[in-house]
Amino acid sequence: MTELAVLQAVRLKGRTTRADLAETLATDPGEIVERLAASGYLIDEATLRLSPDGRARLVTLLAEERTGADPAVLAAAYDDFRGVNADFKALVTDWQVKGGTPNAHDDAEYDADVLSRLDGVHARVAPIIDAVGAQLPRLSAYSVKLAAALDKVKAGETTWLTRPLVDSYHTVWFELHEELIGAAGLTREEAARSGDAQ
């Protein structure tokens, strides 16, 4: 576990408890959290959050991480992701809205049809994560996290498609999207201007 992984996880969550941070990182980062808090990079109160110095430190660490990566590969991966992202956003919209009104999830056939598209989305994003993970190994963890959420959805726990505040498919997807934007050297605002904001 690295400072970068911890700081980025906290940034992506916004605010998080130590327990939730350990769950998303699949390990207890207690010692690193203590060190980062002592250094003034993390604000450790009821929840953890980045300090301004922590944000600056994270920018530096992310830039260092990208120095060993091929920018063309990262840009191509983000480009590939954009198409899959559009399909995933459509799937989520169809899950949440049916016929212009909120989906009451009282039509099993409709819901099953929407969920059946998730396997295709997952199959398309997996090689993108592999390509990025070969450049930035830290990002390979997104394959495991998405697969875990997918397994829960397929087991009938459909709240794991879009449930906030846990590593649902949508939550992990959003975080992956943020990672890919940064890896490609873009800002969220630049991505939004090109129509990629989620």
Image (cartoon, grey):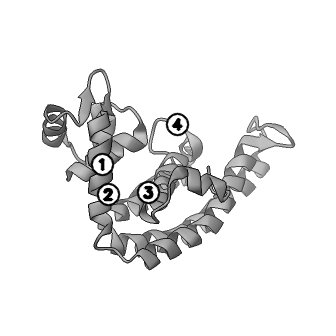
What residue is rendered at 35% in x and 60% in y?
A: 141
User: Distance between the Cα atoms at labels 3 and 1?
Assistant: 13 Å
The residue carrying mark 3 is 179
Whichever of labels 4 and 3 marks the residue nearer the N terminus, that label is 4
Whichever of labels 3 and 1 marks the residue nearer the N terminus, that label is 1
The residue carrying mark 2 is 62
User: Distance between the Cα atoms at labels 1 and 4?
Assistant: 24 Å
User: Residue 159, image x and y in percent?
Assistant: 57, 40
The residue carrying mark 4 is 164
The residue carrying mark 1 is 58
Total number of numbered labels?
4
Q: Nearer the viewer, residue 77 or 40?
A: 40
Q: Can residue 189 be seen in this view?
A: yes
Mark 1 crowdedness (10 Å alpha carbons): few <14, some 14-19, many ≥20: many
Q: What residue type is labelled 2?
A: Leu
Q: In this view, does 102 lie to the left or right of 151?
A: right
Whichever of labels 4 and 2 marks the residue nearer the N terminus, that label is 2
Whether pointer 2 and pointer 1 mark residues with C-beta atoms closer than 8 Å, the reply is yes
Q: What residue type is labelled 1?
A: Leu
Q: What residue type is labelled 3?
A: Glu
Q: Check disc 3 and report its element: helix, strand or loop.
A: helix
Please name which of the two marks, 4 or 3, marks the residue nearer to the observer. Answer: 3
What residue is rendered at 33% in x and 32% in y?
A: 49
